[in-house]
Amino acid sequence: MAVALLPAAVAVVLYTGRATGHLGAGGGWDTARWAAVGLAVPALLLAALVAAVIARARPALSPSVPVSEESAPDLYRLVRDLAERLEVPAPSAIALTPDCDSWLEDRTHRATGPPRRTDGRREPQAPVLVIGSPFLWWMRVAELRALLAPVVAGTGPSAHPDIAAARRFIRGLDAAVAVSSCAKGPLRRLPLRFVGKVARLLLRSCRDHAMIMERGVAAAASERAQGVDYGLRIVAQEQVGLAYAGWDRLLTRVALPAWRMGRWPSRLDAGVVSALTELSRRDRLAEGFASRLGERPACDLLEEPGAIDRAASLLAARLFHGGPAEPGPDWSPVGWQQYPEEVVDRKWRLEAARLHRVLDALPAADLSAADLPAADLSAADLPAADQATGPAPGTAAVTAAGTASGTGTAAGTAAGTASGPAAASAAGTAAVAGTARSYARTAARTAAAPGTHRTADAALTDATPLAAGAPSAPGTSSAPGTSSAPGTSSAPGDLAAVASGPTLAWVIDRLARDNRAGDLVAARLGAEVAREEREEAARQAARGTVAQDAAAGVAWGDGLAESGLPLFPLQPPRTGRELLADHLTAMVCCAAVDTAGAAPGLDWLDGPALLVDGARRADLGVPVLSLVDDGDAEPLRGWLTTVGVRPEKPVRLV
């Protein structure tokens, strides 16, 4: 402000000196006066622009669910009693946020604050108390009161005029930066870009002073709260760390798969209690925490905890996944009782269908793509739709690594060139549909002789399963009731199994035939998943708007929601190998459900789980990774035999 007023001050001094006769007229003095005026006018206009944007910009507000006093009278009474004991003003309102934290938030801006009085002034208002919703369900009433004591004590310093003015100024600068970053149109972008640079400069200049002020406020509030449940506060702080761990696992392992399916769990906060109880059972360090469940939970302070939990769960999906602001046909709630059938089973079948779709779309040349240069594979291995949009981030490197390794080596199998009884005996015996099948290592896993390459006919038979009634490749043999290695010959029973529907055995054979084929499948899976996520993000952006959030009582401020949702992505994009492992696991789980009597289940800490005879099988990951990373299918085939899964049986997808 001083820099902006300096040219105007110089101009005033020059004109005052001429009027009083202390500064002469004409010559250089007139030139100096006009130059000062020429600098003062643009400087004042720019200063007015910066001041107007800072004053009108709405500070960003923490997305939260407002809790009225009618819906939580006991909670308001607890907070007011706590403020009275601390001798500080009580918070003006209470709101819940889907996070493991609590703080005070100033909402006195004219866009969100109370209306003006008749004399034009605004009523002084205490800040709003924002409480993490998981605390209400996991903590007991006494623990919540001890945890909120230092937070409520901060309302005392917030009422100080100088501290309140300093905070409003800093929040105004922050809002001005947000407004300048999301300006649209050239006429608005240019001036707002200047405002943003000035606001950033002012923020950097006052950063250290603001940090010292906030540290002093926090120290004063902590000292004031020393006399209120100090011993119990130590126990409450331990529960904060435990609640954060359970909340993070619940969101990333349980809620995220449902959100990706277009469903949102409507009782996330209640799920935290189940997750932390399960953690207490597994972890010896958490022993004794579950005994607290006999005490009164803090959620009893709410009149309708189910409705509050539902609103907080919907907001969590909005923040962490970018879901719509309101429920709809493609965005419906799901209860924990329906989660295994409506989320887990559907997720497995959709991923298995996607894996089959990618494998079916691979032409014969793609499975022998390891013999091509990496540059040729990056442009030729994707479908036309993927070539237009590009592969998913990270898949190009995976594809290049998988194709560059082994180029020009003896990759492939000798199954396409074996003939006579040797090929049939090497493949082993396989039963027709409805009987057991041998998983002995076949000639398809045997490398070709050094210095040789697969022929075009061998690559074609390796890549494409034989259709019913198709003749065998020249030089191969087929005995009744037997099935040779893929690419040599097929028995009628095996052909009938392939034609009747998708089977796990077919997927395993295609991935195990060449361990470099998994790189191509992973790249295509990554491209397809990325395309589906872009389409879903576009649909969600069209459905969920800031106006709908405002109608639901969720305020954002300038530049917060407009910058794109989700605000806090839970996980980085999955690599192609991770996607392939997930899809293969889903296919195995579908086969186990359809042929071995298994059932989809929910693990509160690990998400979707496979239940065999009522017990969770957590040992599937290692055999799947063995096939995905090394091309070795024997561990997975052994696991299937142990569980009783029949991979030759068709699997229901969607």
Image (cartoon, rainbow, N blue to C red):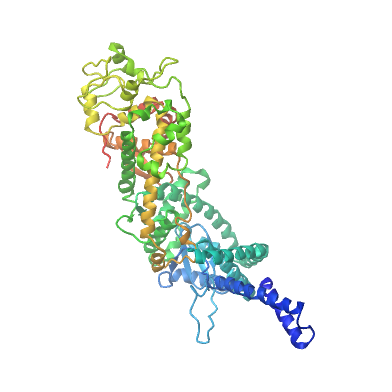
Quadrant location of the C terminus in the rendered image? top left
Where residue 533 sits in the image (x, y, percent)? 39, 48
Question: 489 and 625: which one is in front?
Answer: 489
Which of the 4 image quarters holds residue 170? Answer: bottom right
Where residue 357 sits in the image (x, y, percent)? 31, 37
Establish if 232 lies above or below 641: below
| Residue 407 visible in rendering | yes
Establish if 285 lies above or below 497: below
| Residue 156 visible in rendering | no
Question: 329 and 128: which one is in front?
Answer: 329
Left or right of residue 202, residue 577 in this image = left
Residue at 40% in and 45% down: 389
Q: Residue furthest right?
A: 22
Question: 524 and 193: which one is in front?
Answer: 193
Establish if 559 lies above or below 335: below
Left or right of residue 198, residue 627 in this image = left
Q: Residue furthest front?
A: 27
Quadrant location of the N terminus in the rendered image? bottom right
Where residue 395 sits in the image (x, y, percent)? 45, 39
Which of the 4 image quarters holds residue 299? Answer: bottom left
Establish if 99 lies above or below 388: below
Give the total of numbered labels. Answer: 0
Where residue 282 sits in the image (x, y, percent)? 47, 43
Q: Residue furthest top?
A: 421
Residue at 45% in and 15% down: 450
